Image: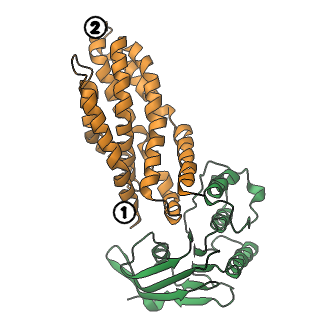
Amino acid sequence: MSAAGKLLVIFRRDCALLLGGARGRGGAVLPLLFFLAVAMLYPFGVGPDARLLARTGAGVIWVAALLAAILPLDRLIEPDLESGFFDQWALRGLSEEAVMLGRIVAHWLCFGVPLMLATPIAAALLAIDGHQLWLLELGLLFGTPGLAAIGVTIAALTAGLRAGAALGGLLLIPLAVPLLIFGAGSLQPGGENGLVLLVAASLVAVAIAPFAAGAAIRAARE
Amino acid sequence: MQPCRLVAEDIACRRGDRVLLRGVGFSLGPGDALHLAGPNGIGKSSLLRILAGLMRPYAGRVEATGTLALSDEHLPLDGHRPLAAALDFWRRIDGAGADNNRFGLDDLGDVPVRYLSTGQRKRAALACMAASGAGIWLIDEPLNGLDAHWSGVAQIAIEAHRDRGGIAVIASHQPLALNDLMVLPLLELVP
């Protein structure tokens, strides 16, 4: 079988594992519930003033998306590293970078897309209007690939470390700040150009991540 | 199977800041089998990972012609999936394997991998490696956890692999009953 065919088989397995969950860890549902829970709790915290909610709600959704990205970190790479999957793929001549790129796409499909699908519900809870929702969805479409890329990189870097999960969360926050600034900034009046910068920040993350994560896997072998 | 060779020249192996082994050298051709012998912790597994190209040797070089398969202490199968489905993942990646030895796993096809016993896990790991169709087998402790019957089956499988022109490098602290087995006593190579 060609290398592309093998990568496709691996990609399908990645999707199945990330979507369905395994080893006692939730799949795509857990980050989604967390995301919706934040949107649900926020009005309880600041009160039911629709104007205040509409003005701040979109920013809250961005923060919730960023924090939800932390939840799946510990099962992105670690279980496969522990079971020797990465060694076996390397022995079959598949580059770590290609495997990681596949995993980033799989992670985005199982994390970014459900988040975008849940956003209209969160928007309704936070009294966000149609135009804002449209900008929010566009921003998430551009920003979540970057979040997924950063997530996979950090998961690869912290795999095998004690307390790697907690450390991963701490590492993700500063790296994801540009995405948050441009994503939430694009929702301000006249801030639509923020979307362009969001795309740029996201693309940089996606371009670097497979190489950084691949190098991390190789370094973990030494 | 393409003709395979595995040549190691003057390899040194380091873990942390300690040199475990120095001056490991051998040359293997089709049908050869090498037993890396030595007590626990001497560096057998590290040496196998160097031969597999997963770790860089501290000194020396490895030259491998032909595809490699490694069976070590990890079992590269998804614990929550039934054994047959988990093995099928590798079968789809490797295509139809050269070796159809199922190591008696057919009856366990619908048992989730995490419920397998130590010996059954070892047999699954060996079946995985055999089905990969690789020419060079690097095996870490192939007989660990296997009873007398399955030890015999495993060694017969290794012999059959050699008959097809394959190479086997076996790290084990146990004696092996293979024909024309070369033995490399690693204790003599500790610096």
The mark total stands at 2
Residue A120 at x, y = what percent?
A: 43, 18
Counting residues from the start of the chain, the first of labels 1 and 2 encountered is 2
Which residue was labeled with disc 1?
A219
Could you tell me which chain the residue with mark 2 belongs to?
A
Residue A49, x across and y down, in percent = 30, 7
Q: Quadrant of the N terminus of chain B?
A: bottom right
Q: Is residue A58 visible?
A: yes
In the picture, the disc for residue A53 is: none
The orange one among the chains is: A
As rendered, which of B139 and A190 lies closer to the eye?
A190
Taking the view exactly as shown, the residue that stands out farthest to the right is B107
Q: Position of residue A215 (x, y in %)?
A: 36, 58
Amino acid carrying label 1: it is: Ala
Q: Quadrant of residue A214?
A: bottom left
Chain identifier, colour green: B
